Image (cartoon, rainbow, N blue to C red):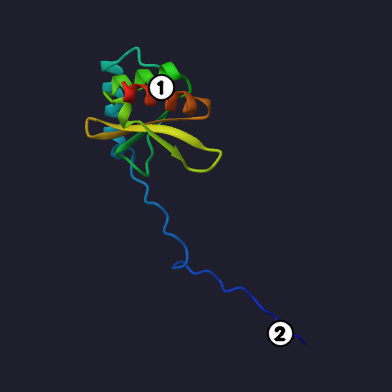
């Protein structure tokens, strides 16, 4: 009989700990920030918005059109120089900025064609 080689069995200490999920009540600040934004800027374009139970003090907003992007940037009082260009993977370039609303971090980002347009507009605004 031959010797059989087996992979070691992963133990719980070998795996990353699962992220702790908060309760719905923990997300009240994020919901209040969105409510304040809607009250202060009722014409602000709709977007794909998430408020995660993993990061209760953060709202993430994804926009897809340049005019929407600019509306969010202006409403949140973010200067063009505060817009960051990023690249989480070669095919996933993105632009983003973060602002605070009522102590809640609001991260606005976009990917795709908007990235090039935003990079050009941001460079022009910063140079002016």
* Residue carrying label 2: 3
Q: Is residue 115 above or below residue 18?
A: above
| Residue placed furthest toward the front | 127
Q: Secondary structure at mark 2?
A: loop
* Residue carrying label 1: 121
Asked whether 106 or 111 is in front, the reply is 111
Q: Is residue 107 visible?
A: no
Residue 123, quarter of the rendered image: top left
Asked whether 54 or 108 is in front, the reply is 108
Q: CA distance from mark 1 to mark 2?
A: 65 Å
Q: Secondary structure at mark 1?
A: helix
The N terminus lies in quadrant: bottom right
Residue 12 location in percent, x, y? Answer: 46, 66
Circle 2: is it few (<14), some (14-19), or many (20+) Cα within 10 Å? few
Q: Which mark is residue 112?
A: none
Q: Is residue 39 above or below residue 18?
A: above
The C terminus lies in quadrant: top left
Q: Residue at x 52, y 38 (%)?
A: 92
Asked whether 86 or 11 is in front, the reply is 86
Residue 44 location in percent, x, y? Answer: 35, 16
Q: How many marks?
A: 2
Q: Residue at x 56, y 71 (%)?
A: 9
């Amino acid at each position: 009989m031959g010797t059989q080689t087996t992979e070691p069995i992963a133990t719980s200490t070998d795996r990353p700990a699962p992220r702790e999920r908060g309760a719905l009540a923990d997300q009240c600040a994020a919901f209040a920030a969105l409510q304040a934004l809607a009250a202060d800027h009722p014409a602000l374009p709709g977007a794909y918005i998430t408020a995660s139970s993993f990061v209760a003090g953060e709202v993430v907003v994804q926009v897809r059109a340049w005019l929407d992007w600019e509306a969010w940037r202006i409403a949140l009082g973010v200067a063009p120089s505060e817009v960051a260009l990023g690249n989480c993977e070669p095919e996933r370039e993105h632009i983003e900025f973060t602002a605070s609303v009522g102590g809640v971090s609001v991260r606005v980002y976009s990917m795709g064609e908007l990235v090039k347009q935003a990079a050009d507009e941001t460079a022009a605004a910063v140079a002016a």
